[in-house]
Amino acid sequence: MAANRGMVAGSHNRNEFVMIRNDGDAPAPGKEVKGTVGQACQICGDTVGVSATGDVFVACNECAFPVCRPCYEYERKDGVKCCPQCKTRYKRLKGSPRVPGDEEEEDVDDLDNEFNYKQGNGKGPEWQGEDIDLSSSSRHEPHHRIPRLTSGQQMSGEIPDASPDRHSIRSPTSSYVDPSVPIPANQLNLYRIVIILRLIILCFFFQYRVSHPVRDAYGLWLVSVICEIWFALSWLLDQFPKWYPINRETYLDRLALRYDREGEPSQLCPIDIFVSTVDPLKEPPLITANTVLSILAVDYPVDKVSCYVSDDGSAMLTFESLSETAEFARKWVPFCKKHNIEPRAPEFYFQQKIDYLKDKIQPSFVKERRAMKREYEEFKIRINALVAKAQKVPEEGWTMADGTAWPGNNPRDHPGMIQVFLGHSGGLDTDGNELPRLVYVSREKRPGFQHHKKAGAMNALIRVSAVLTNGAYLLNVDCDHYFNSSKALREAMCFMMDPALGRKTCYVQFPQRFDGIDLHDRYANRNIVFFDINMKGLDGIQGPMYVGTGCCFNRQALYGYDPVLTEADLEPNIVVKSCCGGRKKKSKSYMDNKNRMMKRTESSAPIFNMEDIEEGIEGYEDERSMLMSQKRLEKRFGQSPIFTASTFMTQGGIPPSTNPASLLKEAIHVISCGYEDKTEWGKEIGWIYGSVTEDILTGFKMHARGWISIYCMPPRPCFKGSAPINLSDRLNQVLRWALGSVEILFSRHCPIWYNYGGRLKLLERVAYINTIVYPLTSLPLIAYCVLPAICLLTNKFIIPEISNYAGMFFILMFASIFATGILELRWSGVGIEDWWRNEQFWVIGGTSAHLFAVFQGLLKVLAGIDTNFTVTSKANDEDGDFAELYVFKWTSLLIPPTTVLVINLVGMVAGISYAINSGYQSWGPLFGKLFFSIWVILHLYPFLKGLMGKQNRTPTIVIVWSILLASIFSLLWVKIDPFISDTQKAVAMGQCGVNC
């Protein structure tokens, strides 16, 4: 599809389709991505060879698609039994053994070779993509073995013979990634032992706590025990999913040797990259431009990369900024590739305080770098001018350069818009080389339709990308997450194209890393504990959760299909094995399930004939189509025959004969606001609706179908973004995450009860349950943080006087807590400061954002009161280093933790005053109460510093509200005083007698 041919806008529902700013001729036909290349096999790359008669071997008599004899034999015996190009069933040729389904073929008489299968000596095909079927049935994995992109997991069987020019390493561990780099056994075993000991100590601790109530402070004791039991359950939900932590390692050189050899056409799979943005005033266009530039300069074949930018706010500022970005990319991309610079986002490259001459050997580098920096500064000026112009919207609305009114002047009522800025048939860089495709997309919005915020925008991108380019894999990033490593796509492909892991991997998740965070990470913005401990633990079970950005998807998994599973995957889970025994007869339900899977696999008679597609796409049959009639396909995917056809192309790509003009019209159709009505979009396929944290739901649905996910942590972070370092922005961000978890908790997709008959592993389910119930911890947490102050004010305590024997359990309890944390830090490599910041913000968030999320979630479920989604601001920090850190922004989220702080400070003053007046004997009990109050204040210390700001001044409104609430609470407590009986009150109020 040609670039810069003008914007396409329209509405399928209103039968509108217009071309705006159409300066050139009609678009050139799409470039054929893959065709016959000489006489090389298009599956394994070896020569096709000759037949018994000496002629060139032809596997398919219909289209003559070049396939060698061994691959032909494999496809007939264990593969999909049809031609990868025309999908015609392979006929048995002379010299080929008979397979089921050949009985109706009467033109071949070769009884000598009917059952002459080669046992172990024939060359199996190397998995490359044209014929691998990720169908909706959980199929058995073929028993051929290929040197993998991963190593570490032992593979049974032998490696089939491979030609020396295709594989330089032929050992069982020759792979592109190491799926299980073991953590030292001494560290991991000790860690597990401490967890078990901590669990035992916890049981003894609760046995003592429950059996020794505090009679004179029964209410305080009861509340404290309930809180402690909830904390213990939360710890169990968080701890056991970290039982199997693993590390992974990739081998990019082996990937290149197999799929991207120099001088040969690259066989890497095509990838569509999604960038989402909404409000250019909160998400500065310069940040989005840097993200797009880092994508366009990625180290990957340019004809296999397409970048789609979703503008869900239909802002002309975003459109014009992207146009400027496309022009600057013509200079920036060749500079990056010529000098191999990192990172390839210009803003962050030029900001680096490193020796930029290191490893640079070209004499022209310094001169070209200076010229490029000047070009970039001029580019920034142009972007800043656009931003300044956008501050004041004209009364008549925005107009484009040719005088046409901007179609998106009303962000809530506008047609769909598509503009191809760069493409494979246009938009060359300054060196005359092609650039990756860059496409601007703004989906149609109309009043009265539910648009589903970010999840709806991502689903629109899935469809429009499937129509225009149809990459086999998708990678999504937020507009502020740039590619910090140009090898990021290759890192993901090491897993996705791995023969053993790729066919059952739904996504590869990368950790989030951030720029612009203060040195001490006051508000735990880096989330190091989650990304470096929790996610590694999940990687050893069924895979990490999807966190919304920096994730590469298998497109077939997003379409709701099931993975290709092995015999081991179809076995009952470990809980069933442990309870029922591994040698017992398999259950009837399991055998029925297995037979159903096999039946789906072996059938090959398609129902859905692709020749009926309206746009003239040639017939493209697939064995999955037998499962659904055309109406069921429309109900599932929507009424776009071109898009439906693309879902059958498991390895991506579009038919070369497709008319680009018809694709643009169909692209407008699939982003129309009513396209998803009465379909399964957002329910079973695509990004799942029902929560503001659509990422958790989407990953959960994939795992429930049996897919696995991978956690990729290369030495150089692949993606970096910006985080809100301001206290109020950070709390609002956490509030949105917690609110999404509460919404899932009260939905039908709640992991506590959803899909117990699926393939979700037990510990993976436990991890998801922990993810959705953690906001509820705010209720016992805020009660537990107030308890120390109440104890100091009332001179009561939640623990009775303890003996030395009981004191031992308390000491062991605290020791086990610290030991578990220390061992986690040891095997994960996380620093003590990061761990402590995480603990502090757990209390800060629990007493503020999580508490509000619980009540807002209940209001939404019970009263139907919805909460508006707030886009997190991405600041440029132009006022100095970390200036945003000290800016105070009022929010009601600040009130609860401030109140807790004031109450504890008042309690400490009251307790110390009472001890001074009562003599030295009261100092002993005081220390226990002070310890808990100090514990609370230390955890809230970053919050206190945030309130003080740079000038160490707390805003008056916060002080007034907090003192008011603390005073009301204290007066009510004095008035009620639940720990003094009525008799004692009457005596205290009576007159003193003679014997007083």
Image (cartoon, helix red, strand yellow):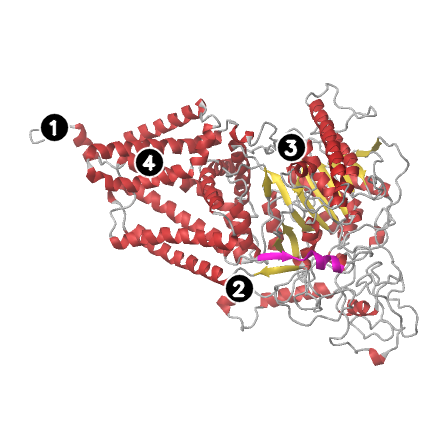
Q: Secondary structure at mark 1?
A: loop
Q: Residue at (69%, 30%) from the top-left corner?
A: 447
Q: Is residue 782 magenta?
A: no
Q: Earlier in the sequence, mark 1 or mark 4?
A: 4
> Spatial distance from mark 3 to mark 4, Cα to Cα?
43 Å
> Spatial distance from mark 1 to mark 2, Cα to Cα?
73 Å
Of marks 3 and 2, the one in the foreground: 3
Residue 677 visible, this angle: no
Of marks 1 and 4, the one in the foreground: 4
Q: Any mark on residue 351, and which?
A: none
Q: Secondary structure at mark 4?
A: helix
Q: Toward the viewer: 195 or 487?
A: 487
Farthest residue to the top: give it.
395
Give the magenta range: 247-258
Residue located beneath label 4 in the image: 789
Three-letter code for the amino acid on which mark 3 is drawn:
Glu
Q: Earlier in the sequence, mark 4 or mark 2?
A: 2
Three-letter code for the amino acid on which mark 4 is drawn:
Ala
Q: Earlier in the sequence, mark 1 or mark 2?
A: 2
Where residue 332 appears, as percent x and y from the top left, is 76, 38
Where residue 256 appears, as percent x and y from the top left, is 74, 57
Left or right: residue 464 compared with residue 544 = right
Q: Quadrant of residue 583?
A: bottom right
Q: Any mark on residue 574, and which?
A: 2
Residue located beneath label 1 in the image: 992
| Mark 2, other Cα within 10 Å: few <14 / some 14–19 / many ≥20 | few
Q: Is residue 256 magenta?
A: yes
- Relative vertical location of residue 789 with respect to residue 584 in this rendering, above or below: above
Q: Toward the viewer: 634 or 728?
A: 728
